[in-house]
Amino acid sequence: MANNLSIEKLNFGDSAADHEEALSNYFYQNQLFDSACEPRICLVLGEKGAGKSAIFRMMQDKSQDIPSLANPNFFVGTLANLREHSQLLRTKLPDHFSLVTLWKFYFASIAALKLLDTNTGREGEFLQKFVDHWELNARRFPTFLGSTVRLPLKIVEFEARRAGSTPPTPLQLQEIFAVANRVLAQNSSTLWIALDELDKVAINGNGSKDRSSEALSALMQVHSELFALDRIRFKFFIRSDVYESLTYVDKDHFTNSILRLRWEPEDLAIMLALRIRASDGQSIGTLKLKEAMALINDLFDWPQGVASFDGALNELRDGRNLVTPRDLLNFAINATQSQRRFNSLGTHRPQKVISAAAVEEGLKGASQAKLGDFLTTFPNVYNSFTNLAGHSSSALPRNELQRVLGIRDDIDLNLALEEFWRIGAIGKKGNKPVHLTGEFFVPPIYRRALNLEGV
């Protein structure tokens, strides 16, 4: 049981999957993961910290255990970095090329390089000519098409020594897809291309919000054009607020292929309990909710005002009433660190492993981490939001919120409130649209970091 687990052994891992070196030791394969692996799902949406990168990484690691991805199918997981492709196109195309062409070239390169070594005959010759013409070398580097070294696959090296040669046209890029699709069909195979961290897509070294939005809108258009290729399939991992802000026209083709990551309290409890079990040297295995709650309640001494695990979750909710795995893990990690410090000082001796005072510190640490994420991810709107710090109440009518934020123009205020609402930085009372709402509140996850009333 958890009450026999020493604080020194307790290890919740890292709250961010992209920093987690031993993710497979902690990963909770719940229904969200199984749903993301379904062939019909091509768009995985979630708030920052909702588990997109964890699912992406485990999909890579477990691809041969997933029937729809395993041999004879092909799976390529990468981080979208279009800079090399953009530079290469500029050296060989004298005229301006569109972002749609850039994405098609990116995907055509993946398809050609992935299928080249396993195909001969006319199709293989065609793919080889494409690779030779663009001088794509897939063997000299340990990563593939912009993915990080931490996720070792292959990379393409681009050279531009033959800049004067006649390049393939966008129509010939379509021929690459047609040939690849035909080759895959002959072998009863599917090529899966998964892209993570699409909100960070970089072009020409420019990762600005406006340019990234333009690139993602072009990606959505390319997907709609390639949708008829039944043997080349995609899985895109995107922050939900980024996707919702896109203004491209044809979103309808994604209607039945979107998975929105929303963690239920039961899954959050089991995820946390599995990490407690792993700290005690036990295999992850499976846990029922009752067992998970016993492990958690034996570990934490809940303070007055929180009282239970559900109470802790309520303190971690954002303005959309969501709790992400990252926020819960930040709470647990900070509470553990605080209790270790208390133990070294001989203060706040716990009745269980982690004292009520350490739980309070953990909630404060999670709140500060959330605000820090906000600073990093949304620098354009962060400064006005932090004007709320120290306010006497966490509930504000519209006119008071406008005064505190320091936004005089009503149109600018509506734009800011829409942004805050979309990313969960504020909540609204009632079901009216944001621009018609009169009462707002700062959600619990931000209150401690902002030092607001009631915490």
Image: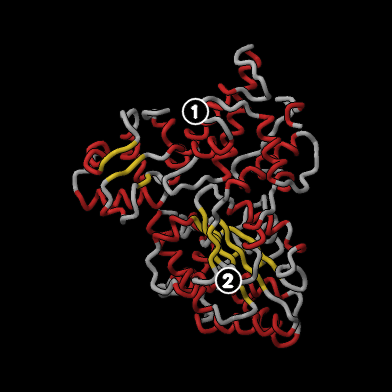
Residue at image location 70% in from the left, 42% down from the top? 290
Query: Mark 2, residues whose alpha carbon is within 10 Å: few (<14), some, or many (≥20)?
Result: some
Residue on which disc 2 sits: 107
> Which sits earlier in the primary sequence, circle 1 or circle 2?
2
Q: Is 257 rendered above or below residue 271?
A: below
Tell whether 333 sits left or right of 90: right
Q: Is 90 rendered above or below residue 341?
A: below
Residue on which disc 1 sits: 305
Q: Is residue 298 visible?
A: yes
Find numbered disc 2 in the image and state the secondary structure of the residue it sits on: helix
Q: Is residue 155 visible?
A: no
Q: Amino acid at mark 1?
A: Gly
Residue at image location 43% in from the left, 31% down from the top? 449
Q: Is 116 rendered above or below residue 304?
A: below
Residue 31 image point, x, y percent: 65, 57
Residue at image location 46% in from the left, 38% down from the top? 445
Find numbered disc 1 in the image and state the secondary structure of the residue it sits on: loop
